[in-house]
Amino acid sequence: MSRTTDAPPGRIVILSAAVGAGHDGAANELAERLRAAGHRVERRDVLDLLPVRTGRLLAAAYHHLLTVAPAGYDRLYAATEQTGRPSPAIRGLLRAAEGRALRTLPADTALVVSTYPGASQLLGRLRRTGALAVPAVTYLTDFSVHRLWVAPGIDLHLAAHSVPAAQALARGAGRTRVCPPAVRPCFAPAGPAARRAARTRFGLPQDARLALLVAGSWGVGEVERAAAEVRGSGVAEPVVVCGRNRVLAERLRALGLGYVHGWVEDMPALMHACDVLVQNAGGLTSLEALAAGLPVVSYRCIPGHGRTNAAALDEAGLARWIREPSDLRSELADLLDTGGHAARAQRTAAARLFASGPAPEHLLADLATAPCGPQHVTTLRPAVFAPVLARPEAAPLAEPGPSVPVPQPARPAPAGRLTERPDAVPHFAPARQPGQAPPARGSFRRRTAPARPGPSRARALLVGVGIAATLLLGVAAPAATADPGGLHAFDRLLDGDGR
């Protein structure tokens, strides 16, 4: 049924995860922008939807891998990139969270947005089975796109640049749109007076060249080594932000570094005080620095997404990836020369990044308020996306048709363009029987098929073992990749979708 003109707009629910700060940071900014435009928005943490508090175990295990066993995380990242799906244990947890996820969505929900790969996997399955009858959108917070970001059933992927947009398409995404990053407006260039005030506030020297080293909210990676090498280059003095890692801050101070901070609430001011950002993960902080006019380089990146993000940022011309310590001095010197070619090229690329099309909140609002009549609920034909397509620089969206072979994209999609794979035929909900009333927007259907039988105790035990092996040791997923037949029974028990 079409929405009447006097009806309030449907609610937008954003699913994120408290895994680091980047996913929540993007979710918070999207929520703030949508609320400022008059939309009702609710936030959910997908980790809270997992059974028996296993979500917090996952976050703790992920933290453990990055800090204690980064090589294990690298193996896990590579294995899931190869298989294109979560490990059997994680899939089992996501399956167990489906009912709670549906119950937590208000009845007037018009759109669900994910800023975390696990949430996208959960929503994609709910869309494919027809349990979720409203559009689901993935907002890509990483600049590189791991295969777990792309879940079958997701209706639209929003990317900050044509580089991640092209990666999403190559990994099977259907509809993809480029839009500027959701960065808080306080991250904006500052003048000389603000720079002097910021240096005074943080106790920094007025005349020195300062390199701001960041390592995420957890303070992970080879931070001590990077800080020592930046200092040894003689080009800039390191200013290190350790996040919530107090042990790291104490170690750096013991090494004689004078400008060491823990968690910094006013990061815009600290960025205004510095001359270049040295990052190791390629997350939200990199985009915030670019918005603030601060040059960015990637150095001693953490395994997995840290390195793939660094490669993508380098490809986009937004941040040099310094792979060798011997190149550190010359690369920093080039960027610190504000009139030089490297600095000017990066400023130009950053300006294009933040002018790449309609803002993400506008695209989400258009999709949330689009009429969703009976013929659109089960298939989400392009008419639902008409308001999104009407935005400037959007490409026409073809009607879904028969599946055809799809070549890999030869080049990134142009900025601001909405693209779709020709074989992206949505099959999100089961077909209605003659005379059956269609579900209204905001309704959520459960599958009526009988549940697959299975020993719940055995499943719970296997989930626990799988989580411990996969996340704490980083070996289960690589083992599954190397010998999938060995874990076939485990996989079938936890995941019955046949993919």
Image (cartoon, helix red, strand yellow):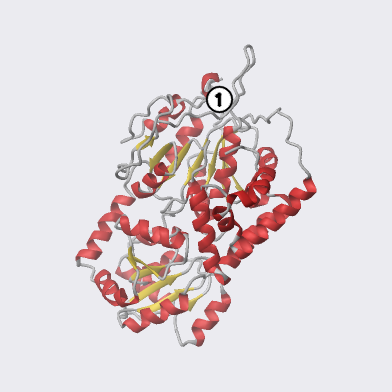
Q: Quadrant of the C terminus?
A: top right
Tell me the crowding category of disc 1: few under 14, some 14 to 19, or many 20 or more residues within 10 angstroms, Cα based: many
Under circle 1, the secondary element is loop
* Residue 312 location (% of width, % of height): 36, 56
Report whether 335 appears left or right of 12.
left
Q: Is residue 263 left or right of residue 407?
A: right
At 52% from the left and 73% from the top, the residue drawn is 262
Quarter of the image with the N terminus is: top right
Where is residue 414 shown, x and y percent of the image?
A: 30, 42
Q: Which residue occupies the extreme top position in the image?
A: 435
Please tell me which residue lies in front, 181 or 454: 454
* Residue visible at 34% across and 76% down in the picture: 325
Residue 367 position (above or below residue 266): above
Q: What residue does disc 1 label?
A: 378
Where is residue 21 drawn, in percent x and y?
53, 60
Q: Which percent across, then down, holds residue 341?
A: 20, 64
